[in-house]
Amino acid sequence: MHAEAAPSGMERADAWSVRLLRVVVMMVALSRRSAAEAPPQFQIQPTGGIVPEGSTKILHCRASGDPQPDYRWIKDDVYLGDFSSNNFYKIVSASKQDVGDYSCIARNSVGSVLSNTGDVRVAYIQPIAAVQRALLSAKAGDALVIEPPPIDSYPESEVTWIGDGEFIFSFTRRKHIVTLQNALVILDVGATDAGVYSMEALNPQLGQAQYSGNVSVTVDGALRSRRADTREPTSASRTLTELDYPASATAHLTVHEVPRLGGPPLHQTKGEVGKQVLLSCEADGSPAPYVDWYRNTVNVSAIRTGRYTVLVNGSLVIDDLKVTDTGIFQCVASNVAGETTDYTWLRVERSAPVWVALPSNMTVLDGEDVTVVCKVDGAPTPTVTWKFNGGGTGSGKSSVCITSGEVCTGHQKHDGKDVSSSSHLQILSSGDLFVADVKQSDAGVYTCEAANELGSVTASAHLTVTVWYLPVHKSDSNQTPKVPLIVLVL
Ligand SMILES: *[C@@H]1O[C@H](CO)[C@@H](O)[C@H](O)[C@H]1NC(C)=O
Ligand SMILES: *[C@@H]1O[C@H](CO)[C@@H](O)[C@H](O)[C@H]1NC(C)=O
Ligand SMILES: *[C@@H]1O[C@H](CO)[C@@H](O)[C@H](O)[C@H]1NC(C)=O
Ligand SMILES: *[C@@H]1O[C@H](CO)[C@@H](O)[C@H](O)[C@H]1NC(C)=O
């Protein structure tokens, strides 16, 4: 049976494996084709919370990204080991030492990002140390204060006093008060107040209590036993205001609000070499949050380039961009209520010069000023060089070569004057060429060349100078008409 069925099963399996192989090959091909880098982006970030002492807490981080990010854990600004693929951090048998702010860094070849912080708190209560004054005596009619022993607990314990084995609730018998500091105050001490007192501290998180030692109270001049006494405090009793304990307290209500980041998140910001970029971090919150910037999880204040400035409004300005500034810029806005973070992948790129405005043919009147346009964009900012009539190619005409940069390989003379110091010709910061008080001799071909390390562009324009009057020379004045004449000089 089994042997008979085997061949057809194998055939089917072969067909399947061929199909599967095809799918795998296709997927590999596809993944190759779509191999675009992507910065790490968190999908799961560590969450804190209160964990009972002795229990296990697992912190989790996960980020997408291409290549696949790896992770590094941080506790209170201290690294917990090196980068690895391990996106879990396990706290085994939590203790007070594990309390802290945990975060992780996700890193790939694009850069690194810091996660949110998870505050891990450990709930515990320590046994209460023995009371120092186990014997107290009070005079009848006085008030007695029993100080609580120190309690080491997180979160804060709820304290209840016990008198002769019974819980004392201040609302049931108006002669007991528990102060804000957990001291027990017995008003108008009477014979019935003599006895053994102790304190229970209950950790509300753990539901676990610790007990203080016993304090024995004796009352001088006491005659009757406690159990027989049922009287309420009389008007002769000392009033609360005579005691040094606050009967009321003032509470300041402060609303704390976790920072919020305004504006749409910009997952990518393009920057160009040599330019400036402003990365904003519009943070709101109460109290007003402060903003820290990180580049690949390094505090930018530690990057001493002098080109990074954090503005008062939280924005980060980077001047004179360099390709090496490329990375993940993360802003963390924090206040007492918490922190919020966002980031952008800054990609600083070079680009070859491209035309913004080409020089165009122009006709101007003799004596006017003219600007020959040459606007280019590029990163780093292209250097503009102007050449006149081919830049001294020996045509016999005057030529010019001036540059916005330091270097000019062409002729430095125009009309016998040094061009760089000439007010007649100037390259404006835009790259345009300004010619003041145009003369006939300025007519010609102006060539603008804009170049940076990635390439160059060149364009020319003809400047035509229109002269209203022919030059009048004494020698040939009789041959020259005195009426205005338009002469085009090329
Ligand atoms: C405290 O006193 C109570 C009774 O008053 C007694 O049961 C208990 O054992 C005492 N505790 C200690 C620690 O001495
Ligand atoms: C922050 O200040 C800079 C410079 O004053 C400004 O350009 C930028 O728009 C401001 N950003 C925000 C978010 O207000
Ligand atoms: C980042 O650097 C600034 C300036 O030195 C500092 O005030 C801030 O505390 C640092 N932030 C962190 C989280 O270390
Ligand atoms: C500019 O003038 C020159 C010479 O007159 C001519 O060859 C060229 O085509 C003109 N260019 C434009 C854009 O008009």
Image: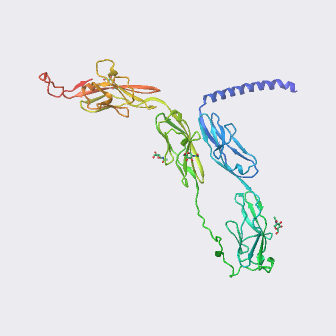
Report the front residue among 50 and 354.
50
Quarter of the figure with the C terminus: top left
As drawn, is 211 to the left or to the right of 427?
right
Q: In this view, does 241 lie above or below 427?
A: below
- Determine which quarter of the picture holds residue 480: top left
Q: Is residue 44 visible?
A: no
- Residue 229 drawn at (x, y percent): 78, 79
Left or right? Give the position of 414 relative to 221: left
Q: List x then y, in percent, for residue 410.
A: 36, 22
Q: In the displayed structure, would residue 349 be above or below residue 152?
A: above
Q: In this view, does 24 lie above or below 133?
A: above
Scheme of image coloration: rainbow
Q: How many marks?
A: 0
On the image, the x and y values in percent for residue 58 come to: 72, 45
Q: Is residue 21 left or right of residue 402?
A: right
Picture quarter with the N terminus: top right
Q: In terms of depth relative to the viewer, which is nearer, 229 or 472?
A: 229
Query: Ligand 1, what quadrant?
Result: bottom right
